[in-house]
Amino acid sequence: MSDEPTVDALMRHLQVCIEEARTIADGKEREQRLWQLEAAMQEAIIYKNRVEELQRHGIDPVRLVDSEEGITPAPAPKKVEALMTGQVHCATCRAILEPDLAFCPACGAEK
């Protein structure tokens, strides 16, 4: 299992592809390919950060479960939140805290 490709390997591959795409002679083709690769890189970063977040909370990121009745699932993370690293989280609800607010935007707890 250790020889399976990793997200980091995918990200390195995409970075090489981005460097290669910068040499495409046709401007329109180059721009389109760079957009594709950069979007793929962003999705890889989002996936990696989401898996790490789930693992920090002791949740198996690949285990599929049915939601319990009466429990509202947590909202999906926003892309901008998933891309950002080093965020401060609320001690009460673990939501990402905005640096310019003195309280948690999700639950209202004070910083």
Image (cartoon, rainbow, N blue to C red):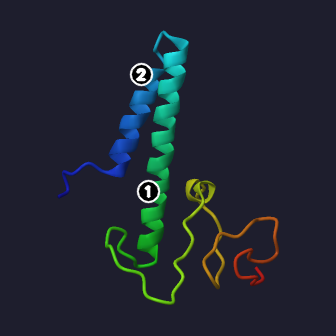
Looking at the image, residue 57 lies above or below residue 1 = below
**What residue is at 74 percent from the left and 77 percent from the top?**
104
Q: Cα distance, mark 1 to mark 2?
A: 24 Å
Toward which corner of the image does residue 102 lie, by quadrant? Answer: bottom right
Q: Left or right: where does residue 32 sit relative to residue 92?
A: left
Of residue 66 and residue 56, the one placed in the foreground of this image is 66
Q: Quadrant of the N terminus?
A: bottom left
Q: Position of residue 107 (x, y in %)?
A: 71, 82
Q: Left or right: where does residue 91 sit relative to residue 3?
A: right
Of residue 11 and residue 66, the one placed in the foreground of this image is 66
Q: Amino acid at mark 2?
A: Glu
Query: Badges 1 and 2: C-beta atoms under 8 Å apart?
Result: no
Single out the residue that lies furthest toward the front: 69
Q: Position of residue 52 (x, y in %)?
A: 44, 65
Looking at the image, residue 7 lies above or below residue 51 = above
Q: Position of residue 3 (x, y in %)?
A: 18, 51
Residue at image mark 1 = 48
Q: Amino acid at mark 1?
A: Lys
Q: Residues within 10 Å of mark 1 (few under 14, many from 20)?
A: some
Element type at mark 2 = helix
Q: Left or right: where does residue 68 sit relative to residue 111?
A: left
Q: Earlier in the sequence, mark 1 or mark 2?
A: 2
Mark drawn on residue 20: 2
Q: Position of residue 23 (x, y in %)?
A: 46, 15
Single out the residue that lies furthest toward the top: 25
Q: Quadrant of the C terminus?
A: bottom right
Looking at the image, residue 73 lies above or below residue 39 = below
Looking at the image, residue 20 lies above or below residue 52 = above
Mark drawn on residue 108: none
Q: Residues within 10 Å of mark 2 (few under 14, many from 20)?
A: few
